[in-house]
């Protein structure tokens, strides 16, 4: 990898096991309310819709945390699951901030960091990446959420201040 100085990681599915964490949160809250449901399919649809809302957005005025909560409410309504309280819904949405990383990621990143600048370049919110990184013992050289670059459109140059553009461009190279 001669000449490469920066490694950028798409944090969502590459670093984090979002599926298991979300299914566990949904199943736990559902069980408390006596709800049986196919939480695996629900979680997959939740992720699909959340990504669809975020990808391609240019200066959307919202972040993935707001999208996760809105999609959760939407899917629960479609499934006629109205027994999850506002507290239950907040708890499920918070699970995104408590996800486990894939077990091999933190040790691998620790081996890469002495040789490369390692950054999280992600559609996830800054607070979400900080929370899961702390929880999983992951240390980044930088976290660059796309909402700071004002674009989540694949293949487009990020916009924003010259400083954020430079950071995003470096992270993508």
Image: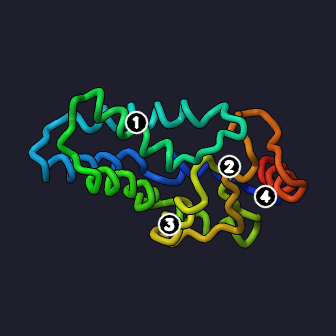
The numbered disc on residue 131 is: 3
Cα–Cα span, label 4 and label 2:
20 Å
Find out whether the residues at labels 4 and 1 contact each other: C-beta distance under 8 Å: no
Q: Position of residue 59 (x, y in %)?
A: 71, 40
Instruction: Say which label, 1 or 3, has the lower sequence index.
Output: 1
Label 2's element?
helix
Q: What kind of element bears circle 3?
A: helix
Q: Which mark is residue 147?
A: 2
Tell me whether the residue at label 2 lies in contact with that at label 1, contact meaning CB atoms closer than 8 angstroms. Answer: no
Q: Residues within 10 Å of mark 2 (few under 14, many from 20)?
A: many
Residue 78's quadrant in the figure?
top left
Q: List the residue tagged with mark 1.
A: 46
Name the residue nearer the viewer: 11 or 71.
71
For the point 42% across and 37% down, which residue is it? 71
Q: CA distance from mark 3 to mark 4?
A: 23 Å
Q: What element does badge 4 sit on?
A: strand
**Other residues around mark 1 within 10 Å, as few (<14) / some (14–19) / many (≥20):** many
As helix, strand or loop, the secondary structure at mark 1 comes to helix
Q: Are marks 3 and 2 in contact (CB under 8 Å)?
A: no
Q: Which residue is mark 4?
A: 6
- Image coords of residue 28 (percent x, y): 20, 53
Q: Sequence-wise, which precedes: disc 4 or disc 1?
A: 4
- Residue located 61% across and 64% down the image: 109
Q: Would you say 166 lies left or right of 79 here?
A: right
Mark 4 vs 2, N-terminal side:
4
Upstream in sequence: badge 2 or badge 1: 1
Residue at far left of view:
34
Residue at (13, 53) in percent of width and height: 32
Cα–Cα gap, marks 1 and 3: 21 Å
């Amino acid at each position: 990898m001669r000449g490469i100085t920066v490694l950028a990681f798409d944090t969502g599915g590459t670093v984090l096991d979002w599926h298991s964490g979300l299914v566990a949160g949904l199943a736990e809250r559902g069980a408390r309310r006596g709800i049986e449901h196919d939480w695996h399919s629900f979680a997959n649809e939740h992720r699909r819709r959340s990504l669809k809302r975020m990808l391609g957005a240019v200066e959307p005025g919202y972040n993935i945390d707001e999208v996760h909560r809105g999609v959760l409410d939407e899917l629960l309504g479609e499934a006629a699951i109205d027994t999850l309280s506002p507290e239950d819904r907040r708890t499920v949405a918070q699970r995104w901030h408590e996800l486990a990383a894939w077990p091999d990621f933190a040790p691998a990143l620790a081996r890469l960091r002495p040789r490369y600048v390692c950054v999280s370049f992600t559609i996830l919110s800054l607070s979400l990446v900080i929370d899961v990184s702390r929880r999983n013992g992951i240390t980044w050289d930088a976290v660059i959420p796309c909402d700071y670059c004002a674009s989540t459109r694949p293949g487009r140059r990020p916009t924003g201040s010259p400083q954020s553009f430079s950071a995003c461009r470096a992270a993508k190279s």
